[in-house]
Amino acid sequence: MATVCSVCGSSEVIYHRRYSGEIFCRRCFLKNIIERVRATISRYELLKPFDKIAVAVSGGKDSLSLLKILYEIERDFPRASLTAITIDEGIPEYRDEAVENAVKYAENLGVPHYVFSFKDFFGFTLTEVVENGIADAISLQPCTICGVLRRRALTLAAKKVGATVIATAHTLDDIVQTYFLNILRGDTRFTPIGIRREVEGVIPRIAPFRLIPEYEIVLYAFLSNIPFQTYTCPYVERSMRNMVRAFLTEYEEKFPGSLYAALSSFEKVYTKSIEEDRRCRKCGEPTGREVCRACELVEKILERLKN
Ligand SMILES: [Zn+2]
Ligand SMILES: [Zn+2]
């Protein structure tokens, strides 16, 4: 095996990309990741020249990397603009640290940044929901509740800042995990994640990292001095996603390229599934049901918090 960078020939190599056989030095790896994001954006036509992009910045390494990379790419598109949005779901320490990282990082790049909270939008924090036993009472894991409500909060926040598109830091791993979770839940009515779809009155969501494996984003963040969180989410142990993640990570390690194979298989099947263009009776967002999951959850939680 050659031990020099496949791009520049430097002998100071830091990464061997097993699924492609490429070897990189630090500089060429960082450049390559940006190029791959740029290629993903153009392959799926994720962005338009006049977009006002709301970047969902949780404050974790993935989202800070996304902000940095979009900042680099968008410098070539002066008519587009970037805004960072952070949703504070109200998990002490864990989110406080992340919000602080997000604020500092956005400020350094000179990107406008806004923090919105579950409390503002829904009237309660995630911690209140868990500590009052509501998650158990409605038989949902904290991560499931958090996921549905963060998604809703992000939509509300993006509307407030007048965004035309929402960019999230979901990686190849995140997306494949979600596809598996959908299957395990018996849900076959989903559409591809992170690809721009224009539906009237709905702000499209894009995932510029959809073709980048998580470990490459981790490496990118590490080499770019992006801060890593010291607190982990206190609820993460309880998540089903963790089980799926563990399985997929081990599988990818043994058989490099499996995540790409899974993504492409799922998307061949699912792009064929018929999209339902029903709207939630309460909020007007697209949903396959009468009342969307977010509206239903908020209502259930508020009802129980009253009692
Ligand atoms: Zn190189
Ligand atoms: Zn709704």
Image (cartoon, rainbow, N blue to C red):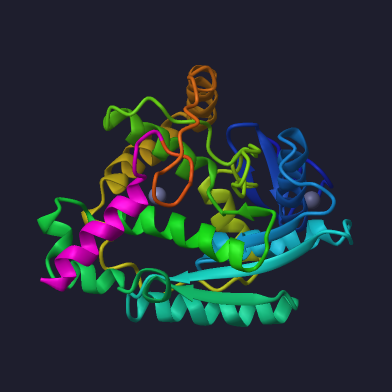
Residue 42 picture location, percent across and down: 78, 38
At 51% across and 29% down in the image, what residue appears? 263
Which residue is depicted at the point 80% across and 47% down? 48
Nearest the camera: 38 or 147?
147
Left or right: residue 274 versus residue 13 is: left
Residue 176 lies, with reference to residue 267, above or below; the image says below
User: Where the N terminus falls, by quadrant?
Assistant: top right
Name the residue: 65% across, 33% down.
21
Is residue 75 found left or right of 138 in the rendered image? right
In the picture, the quarter occupied by the C terminus is bottom left
Q: Taking the image as drawn, is residue 56 in sight? A: no
Residue 63, horizontal then vertical, whole percent: 57, 62
Magenta residues, start to end: 288-307
Does the magenta portion include 303? yes
**Count of numbered badges drawn on the protein:** 0
Asked whether 262 or 1 is in front, the reply is 262
Q: Residue at x 49, y 17 (%)?
A: 269
